[in-house]
Amino acid sequence: MQLNEIRRVYNGQEPFITVYLEGRSPAEDSPQQVRLRWEELRRRLSEDGAADGVLASLDAAVLAEEPGEVQSSGRVLVADATSVVLDETWDAALGSGDAAHLGREPELGALVRERARSVRLLVAIADRHGAVVRQVVVTQSTATTTQAEDHVGDTSEDPESVHKPRKGALSHKNIQRRADEVVKQNLREVADHMDAVAKAWKPDLVVLAGAVQARTALQKELSPALREHFAETDAGGVDDDGAEEALANELHRLAEELSTAAAQQRAEQFGTGKAHGLAVEGADRVSKALEMSAVETLLLEYDRGAAREAQVLAASVRTDAEAALIDTHVEDGIAAILRFDVPDQ
């Protein structure tokens, strides 16, 4: 994960308040539930010394949102000494619990893990008319979240424009040739659109779904960059709820494979780096490396909090380090891959 995505949060004035609201099933009394949950967190923060003015700004942010949205997806908010500087949904599954922190740095380890675990999929569900192209983010406990959807290609139902004729006369061959060219043009348009989206959005994987003929033809039109890393699936489509669910399940499976493989790759990279003096573990060693701006990638354990996590993460943000997850146990739950060797003494 590129930590510059949250850099602006750390530019605020301390102390920082960080609030996590877990996702719950929406209900008729959602507004009252959200209010009661926030009042309990607010009381704890006030007892810890949070300023009334900052708590008031959080009141407005928490209670102004649609309660159903808070309940279903969860939220993370950060306020500095003057105002709310972060207010976003996050993958807060039921059981993780609400939480509130007051400190010199934001407590964004949970959000960073959620972002690092998430996988971006550029999905094209193709047919002879074109494709439905989706930008899908898959997180650990949520099947899929579609950030954008575009219908690309010729959506007309004119049979002459895309359907091959059944007879073999010369005129029919010409019609067929034109029909084939229309299909190719439609899919070329889809491929160009996907290439533009990929350059701006940078997906982890391109997924081709839909009819076999259509997605095979689309694959041939993809740019070399997109053809380097793509997957095909027979599962689902856009025809009905059952097809959508099957596609969502397949996307979740692909995302899990990618996320697991990435964590394993980081573990191997850490082992190699450590053997060559270019990786450290433990809060003290990582902090020292950060003081020297030597950390290239901060490594957090997949599901375990780290010692002095807020301080180490803040230093990583301010020294342009990245963050990633590792699927092996390390000292204090934190490690780093280095830009250059850091002496022990």
Image (tube, rainbow, N blue to C red):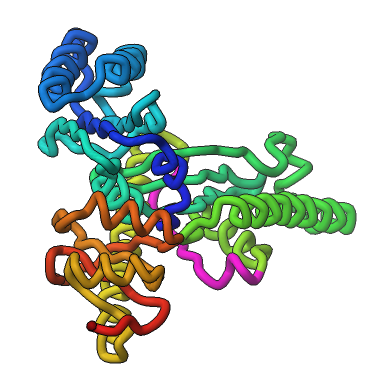
Tell me where residue 93 appears, x and y as whole percent: 19, 38
Residue 62 appears anywhere in the view? no
Q: Is residue 72 part of the magenta span, yes or no?
A: no
Q: Residue at x 59, y 48 (%)?
A: 127
Q: Residue at x 29, y 59 (%)?
A: 256
Tell me where residue 189 appears, x and y as whole percent: 72, 51
Examine the rendered structure and indicate whether residue 117 appears above or below residue 281. above
Tell me where residue 44 appears, x and y as whole percent: 11, 23
Q: Residue at x 44, y 56 (%)?
A: 2
Magenta part of the protein: which range?
224-237
Residue furthest bottom as drawn: 276
Of 278 and 293, nearer the camera is: 293
Left or right of 22 in this view: 290: right
Examine the rendered structure and indicate whether residue 147 appears above or below residue 52. below
Of 301 and 295, nearer the camera is: 295
Q: Residue at x 23, y 82 (%)?
A: 345
Left or right of 120 in this view: 263: left
Q: Quadrant of the N terminus?
A: bottom left
Of 153 and 322, nearer the camera is: 322
Residue furthest front as drawn: 345
The quarter of the picture where residue 216 lies is bottom right
The quarter of the picture where residue 270 lies is bottom left
Q: Is residue 233 part of the magenta span, yes or no?
A: yes
The quarter of the picture where residue 82 lies is top left
